[in-house]
């Protein structure tokens, strides 16, 4: 196997420069250090520790169930696994809605305890004062507009956004207001490409898209959807592998081997008392 290229450090400056130069950047969700290490080696520019961890990691029914403390701990794990990659953390449901003070404190925890480089909130124009306050405090915010999964309770499920003229205008207004308030990045989910184009015309910070067409500066998908291990991926997420089947095959082979007592790998020999050094050899 070829040794992977050593990636250089990706910062907000790197991403902003790539966006200005129209060089697309890649973003994937990630929830653990081991996977983060491989994604960094692959050259993924941004890792998003999304509240989709509620579904992907914890098996909870939707993203609104993501516990704040758990997501902060997962974010720190991802940054430790991928120290040269820009790590963005999602603020989960009810961690920024109750009051500005609480939102600011929780965003700060994502940066100090969670080692996040950027913090993302699902937002509309009404969040501009909060974003302004966070920016003043030194929190780099990504404003998530368009379809907002944390609002699924209001609409009866995950859905697209910006598909009527008035809805489209609102999504664009949200993006503009959040940038004006100090958001350093925007993310737009599940909107028609015409909405993406208007956001690109009217804002200047890097725009990450998911189900929003190819024009965005960067693209993100949930890693499990890309790997083909989720049961029902969203319509815009085309898997590039069928790793669920591969995983199942490997596990089936393990079950077979265990049942037939086929256990390979190193076997520990009995040592003669006092003959070997007192230092125990490492098993890794
Ligand atoms: O939580 C998440 O993974 C996200 C992406 C789907 C954009 O917000």
Image: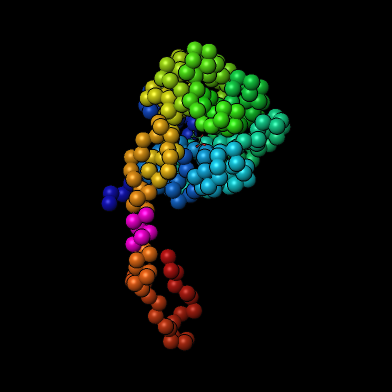
Residue 267 at x, y = what percent? 37, 75
Residue 20 image point, x, y percent? 42, 22
Where is 254 relative to 18, above or below? Answer: below
Q: Is residue 172 left or right of residue 138?
A: left
x and y percentages locating residue 231 in the rendered image: 42, 43
Does residue 204 appear left or right of residue 115 in this picture?
left
From this viewpoint, which residue is outermost toward the front?
Answer: 156
Q: Residue 173 versus residue 82: which sits nearer the camera?
A: 173
Image point (62%, 42%), residue name: 68
The answer to whether 239 appears left or right of 163 in the picture is left
Extent of the magenta region: 248-253
Pick the front one: 1 or 249: 249
Task: Give the residue drawn at x 34%, y 56%.
Answer: 249
Kindly report the secondary structure that dominates the magenta region of the rendered protein: helix
Q: Residue at x 38, y 69 (%)?
A: 258
Magenta span includes 178: no
Q: Residue furthest left?
A: 1
Q: Does residue 189 appear anywhere in the picture?
A: yes
Outermost residue toward the bottom in this view: 273
Total number of numbered discs in the rendering? 0
Determine the image quadrant of residue 67. top right
- The color scheme shown is rainbow
Q: Is residue 200 visible?
A: no
Q: Per the image, is 251 magenta?
A: yes
- Residue at 49 percent across and 79 percent down: it is 278
Q: Quadrant of the C terminus?
A: bottom left
Q: Looking at the image, is 221 positioned above or below residue 36?
A: above
Camera-side residue: 264 or 132?
264
Q: Position of residue 218 (x, y in %)?
A: 42, 29
């Amino acid at each position: 196997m070829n040794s992977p290229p050593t990636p250089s450090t990706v910062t907000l400056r790197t991403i902003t420069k790539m966006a200005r130069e129209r060089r697309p950047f890649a973003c994937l969700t990630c929830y653990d250090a081991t996977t983060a290490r491989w994604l960094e080696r692959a050259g993924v520019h941004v890792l998003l520790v999304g509240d989709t961890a509620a579904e992907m990691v914890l098996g909870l029914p939707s993203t609104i169930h993501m516990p704040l403390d758990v997501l902060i701990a997962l974010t720190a794990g991802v940054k430790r696994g991928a120290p040269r990659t820009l790590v963005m953390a999602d603020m989960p449901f009810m961690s920024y809605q109750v009051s500005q003070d609480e939102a600011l404190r929780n965003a700060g925890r994502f940066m100090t305890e969670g080692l996040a480089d950027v913090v993302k909130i699902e937002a509309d124009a009404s969040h501009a004062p909060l974003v302004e306050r966070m920016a003043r405090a030194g929190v780099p915010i990504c404003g998530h507009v368009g379809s907002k999964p944390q609002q699924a309770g209001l609409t009866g499920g995950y859905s697209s956004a910006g598909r009527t003229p008035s809805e489209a205008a609102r999504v664009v207004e949200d993006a503009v207001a959040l940038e004006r308030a100090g958001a350093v990045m925007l993310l737009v989910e599940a909107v028609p490409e015409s909405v993406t184009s208007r956001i690109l015309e009217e804002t200047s910070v890097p725009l990450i898209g998911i189900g929003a067409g190819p024009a965005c500066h960067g693209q993100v998908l949930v890693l499990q959807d890309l790997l083909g291990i989720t049961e029902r991926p969203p319509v815009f997420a085309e898997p590039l592998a069928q790793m669920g089947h591969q995983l199942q095959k490997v596990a089936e082979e393990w079950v077979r081997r265990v049942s037939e007592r086929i256990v390979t790998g190193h076997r520990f020999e009995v040592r003669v008392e006092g003959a070997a050094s007192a230092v125990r050899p490492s098993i890794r």
